[in-house]
Image (cartoon, helix red, strand yellow):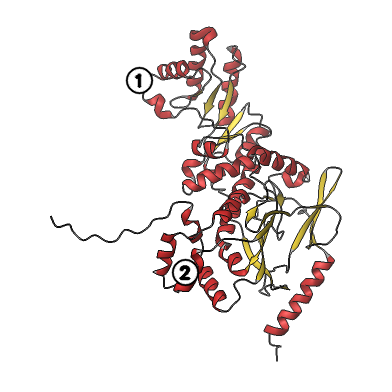
Amino acid sequence: MNRPNRPKPTLMPSREQGIALFTDLYELTMLQAYRELGLAEREAVFSLFVRRLPPERNFLIACGLDRLLGELEALRFGPGDIEYLAAQSFKPDFLDWLAAFRFTGTVHALPEGTPFFANEPVLEVIAPIGAAQLIETLAINRVGFETIIASKAARVVEAAAGRPVIDFGGRRAQGHDAAVEGARAAFVGGAAATSNVLAGRLYGIPVAGTMAHSFVQAFTDEMEAFRAFARIYPDTTLLVDTYDTVEGVRKVIALAREMGAAFRVHAVRLDSGDLLALSKEARRLLDEAGLATVQIFASGGLDERKIAGLMVAGAPIDGFGVGTDMMVSADAPAVDIVYKLTEFAGEGRMKLSAQKRTLPGRKQVFRTTIDGTAEGDMIARYGEPLPGEPLLAPVMRDGVRLEPSPPLAAVQARARAEIARLPRALRALEPAAEPYPVAISPALQEYEAEVREKIAARNVQPKA
């Protein structure tokens, strides 16, 4: 029997195998050029930093380093990757070199959970220029995305004033990878739990959830739905706004009377309407029924400003579920994060482009604290013996991470403690009247001027 001709199957990458191709084409074309010119193995330093904070942010929270380090350790060009690049007309000897490629660089970085500010290096990569260039897109993506979400979550948690915040954003995230990594970042930023089960399994984040309106709608009677759910899950939270919120609360009270000592419902959930008025009425009804231990949980289009408004108005809400706004950082969905060459073959490098300042060479950031409050940062040359706490720490050497992944709860605790050290004005939702002071050390300023002069002399023609 004759079989029809079929196209040769393409080797499709797994998530891990394909990470080497998570780069921009120009990085590979430059890498091939570096090799042909004999430059690929010469040492370079790249700095990753944010040029300016988004208008609604007084600080950012460093996040995303852990997965980046794991991906750098595992970075390989598999057979399918090489096959694909061959079809893009890369040269055979370059492809052979890529097949044996391993990342062998050194990385210094801010520990995850560290607040940082504009122009401060979040991480510095010291590696052969080809390898350091290759990972640009990956580094910006991993650190940039998780930093955005952790920073947004920190604002939401601040607004909640001690009430737990649960991440409900997986279904509205920009893809499932963003949902999982976003849940991790939100936890670093202070979220108490996530509804995303995969994130819970991968990262040990507590998982939490209640019920959907569809469960209530599946029954002909709302009371019947509550009765059935509470029987299967005695310590549950019941969603009371499917039809009429106040009437839903009354049915929970009726269920409590019906079940007597067996009633263990933990909370009612409000998901729509005037949350201030409804939470106050729900609290009144529950308290009058002797159900003071039944809490009130709120969700439905919340962000940090809505939550802050509810808290200021005295809403008796015990916890919040926040979805879309936190998981896409709706008011600041992107940050001006860049990865720039600052040293090559032992010489400082920088751009002279207008409004795109880069500080040359390797650097360190020192944070000065007085009476437990951070007073200011100093960006310095690497090796400068300045007062204060040095923030950048070695995390990878010769392509191998120096420490195993810390427990995520410890990263969250670090973020909480470091945010608490910031001046109170910076922790407010409004832009601080006075931004946090970040200075550049005299030695680094002097080196910047020296490098600028050298570059200008070689590349900028004097005006006639």
**Of residues 423 and 434, the one drawn nearer to the viewer in this rendering:** 423
Q: Which mark is residue 408?
A: none
Above or below residue 366? Residue 234 is above
Residue occupying image coordinates x 50% and y 66% = 98
Left or right: where does residue 324 sit relative to residue 357? left
The secondary structure type at the circle numbered 1 is: loop
Left or right: where does residue 427 sit relative to residue 40? right
Mark 2 neighbour density, 10 Å: few (under 14) some (14–19) many (20 or more): some
Mark 1 neighbour density, 10 Å: few (under 14) some (14–19) many (20 or more): few
Closer to the eye: label 1 or 2: 2
Identified by mark 1, the residue type is Thr
Residue 52 visible here: no
**Of residues 444 and 67, the one drawn nearer to the viewer in this rendering:** 67
Q: Which residue is mark 2?
A: 95
> Residue 24, percent across and down?
51, 65
Residue occupying image coordinates x 49% and y 72% = 94
Left or right: where does residue 135 sit relative to residue 360? left
> Residue 161, percent across and down?
68, 34
Q: Which residue is mark 1?
A: 220
